Image (cartoon, rainbow, N blue to C red):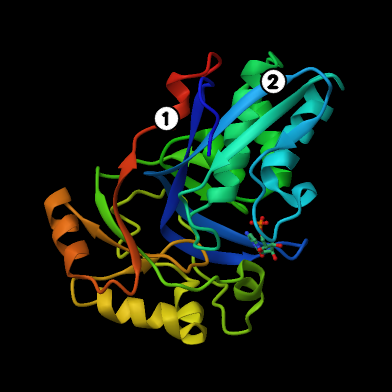
Amino acid sequence: MLPEHHPRYPSPAKLNLDLRIIGRLPNGYHALESIFTLIDLQDTLCIVPRSDGQIVLHTPTPNVPDEQNLVVRAAQSLRDNAATPGHGADIWLEKRIPMGGGLGGGSSNAATVLMVLNDLWQCGLDTAQLLELALPLGADVPFFIFGRTAFARGVGEQLQPIDVPQQYYVLVRPDVHVSTPAVFAHPDLPRNSIGHPHPTYQNLQPLRNDMQAVVLQNYPEVQAAFAELQQYGTPRMTGSGSCLFLTCEQPQQAQHIRQQLSDRWQSWCVHSLLTHPLFGMISNR
Ligand code: C5P
């Protein structure tokens, strides 16, 4: 439950419309090329400054100690790098984005905290400085600071805008948590896709996700959802899964497909967002 009478800040999920693994970096991470887009499935945060330097998360995440929680770590990082020790915050989080689904919920929450507290604490960091604080928190966090449909390189930190048609998606959540490090470490994962020097939505067709085959092979629950969605089109996975989506031109088509799906899966009809919904609410964007 969020407290009443405090401003509420949105924290949208992402989809990877395309994801290719180009190679491995010296630090063991994988070099990727990926199209990221924001969608209108959102968490909500309530963030209120306090003056005793404490970062207090009032809605802890089950199985995630506060000191590992990206929300807390984002606030601490901004305080330690750009504010004074007296800057603190009370934070409440209302989750709608499932965890372990490849939707970037935790990364999005961290980005929202960085952007909102930069504003509330009047740190005055520009986007480039926020992007720098974002990357050590997780490879997906910079995209949410960038805040619009992006083609990402590196581990996800080299971002450029890319035009993607306005689309609707049927999003399905197989009831299983996929471990991102385990998928990245899998011996069968392809790691030699060809990079695109001049990517466009058109010349990346057909879109694909290089992590999908390994996840379908190793998680029967994801395979079952994939088989059901295949009746209606060509499903793709987002991130390292487990969520799958189908692309639709019209919202009615997405709603129709969703109605046919078995109630075995949690599902949503979502659409892409042109820009981060926070951009209209904070002063420095
Ligand atoms: O950055 P994030 O915490 O989301 O990554 C989780 C794990 O996934 C990393 O510890 C790493 O093992 C793996 N990973 C990778 N290459 C990437 C992103 C993540 O190998 N580009």
Residue at point 55% right, 63% down? Answer: 100
CB of mark 2 near ligand 1 (< 8 Å): no
Q: Residue at x 30, y 65 (%)?
A: 206
| Above-or-below relation of 265 to 103 | below
Give, as a three-letter code, the residue at label 1. Pro
| SS label for mark 2 | strand
Pointer 1 or 2: first along the chain: 2
Question: Residue 184: x and y, percent?
Answer: 62, 71
In the picture, measured across the screen, residue 229 lies left or right of residue 265, that is left
Tag 1 and tag 2, C-beta contact below 8 Å: no
Q: Which mark is residue 90?
A: none
Marks 1, 2: nearer the viewer: 2
Residue under pointer 2: 49
Is 70 in front, or is 143? 70
Of 226 and 56, the residue lying toward us: 56
Q: In whole angstroms, how far apart are the C-alphas of marks 1 and 2? A: 21 Å
* Amino acid at circle 2: Pro
Query: Which residue has dot 1 on it?
Result: 277
**Quadrant of the rendered image holding ligand 1:** bottom right
Dot 1: what SS? Answer: helix
Q: Position of residue 33 (x, y in %)?
A: 51, 56
Residue 101 point in image, percent of width and height: 49, 62
- For image coordinates 64% across by 52% down, the residue present is 61
Badge 1 local density, few (<14 within 10 Å), some, or many (20+)?
some
Residue 142 makes an appearance in the image: no
Residue 146, placed above or below residue 155: above
